[in-house]
Image: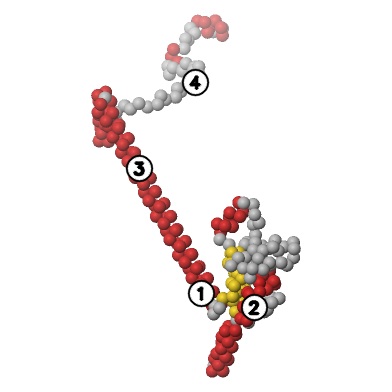
Amino acid sequence: MDITRKSKKKKLVKEGGKDEKRGVCYLGRIPPRMDPSTLRQMLSQFGEIQRVYLTPQDHSAQVHNIRAGKFQRQNFSEGWVEFSDKRVAKRVANMLNGEQIGGRKRSSFYYDLWNIKYLSKFKWDDLTEEIAYKKATREQKLALEISAAKRERDFYLSKVDKSRALSCIEERLKKKQKVEEDPGLKQKAKEDSGLKQKAEEDPENKPDLPVSQPKREVIRRFRQKTPVADNAAEIRPQLSKDILAGVFGGS
């Protein structure tokens, strides 16, 4: 364990010594269509580069460029480049500042100028702290804006509910005033209220309320045969005995 701790400590001391030798250059303007890889490729010919960071362009500016019909690729506003040797960083800044970027003539930033400056006694850790602080500030501002928007929404909804309640009260007052002014409507309202009260007190004896007219039923009638009486045998006419004797040859 002691050996590993000592090795880690030595490694940190070496890296700290290397950080003391490194230098950081600041770019105040990044030409359109230039990305970190292109910038690293262009500046690495002057010396060894450790890290490159470019700040993305503001969202509002990007939206403005899109609406204006400009190139929709991600653009950057400013950047930092860390060289392995601070002397190289200082020399590059003094040599390139205000000069034409050049490169390929077909590139979109061929005629742009370098805006680069060496930052004395500035370390990369300072940059990371500044970026973290800006990010926290931006998130805090966004949270405040969201909470303010929620409060406005709740206030608006409460006012809408209150206005609806007031409008209902005004309508009831208008109806009441209209009934009081017209005696016929007043009497009718009293009768309706009395009928309603009776119906609530005695649900079996409900007053005749206007109902919809029932549908007319169609009744089919068929021709019926007259039924045979129970004393049909008694009512049936009988033949006399003389007629029967004449027919059957009886004496």
Q: Tell me the residue that label 1 is attached to.
A: 129
Q: Position of residue 149 (x, y in %)?
A: 43, 55
- The answer to whether the residues at label 4 and label 1 have Cβ atoms under 8 Å apart is no
Residue 220's disc is 4
- Separation of residues labelled 1 and 3 (CA atoms): 51 Å
Please tell me how crowded label 4 is: few (under 14), some (14-19), or many (20+) other residues with Cα within 10 Å: few
Which amino acid type is marked by label 4? Answer: Arg
Q: How is the image coloured?
A: secondary structure
**Is residue 151 or residue 47 the one in the foreground?**
47
Disc 2 and disc 3: Cα gap in Å? 71 Å
Real-space CA distance between mark 4 and mark 2, rounded to the nearest whole angstrom = 117 Å
Of label 4 and label 3, which has the lower sequence position?
A: 3
Q: Which residue is mark 2?
A: 91
Q: Neighbour class for label 2 at 10 Å: few (<14), some, many (≥20)?
A: few
Residue at x 61% of width, y 81% of height:
86
Q: Which residue is mark 3?
A: 163
Residue 91 is at least partly visible in this image: yes
**Circle 2 — which element?**
helix
Q: Quadrant of the N terminus?
A: bottom right
Q: Work out whether 191 lies above or below 18.
A: above
Q: Decide if residue 100 is on the left or right side of residue 226.
A: right
Q: Residue at x 42, y 58 (%)?
A: 147
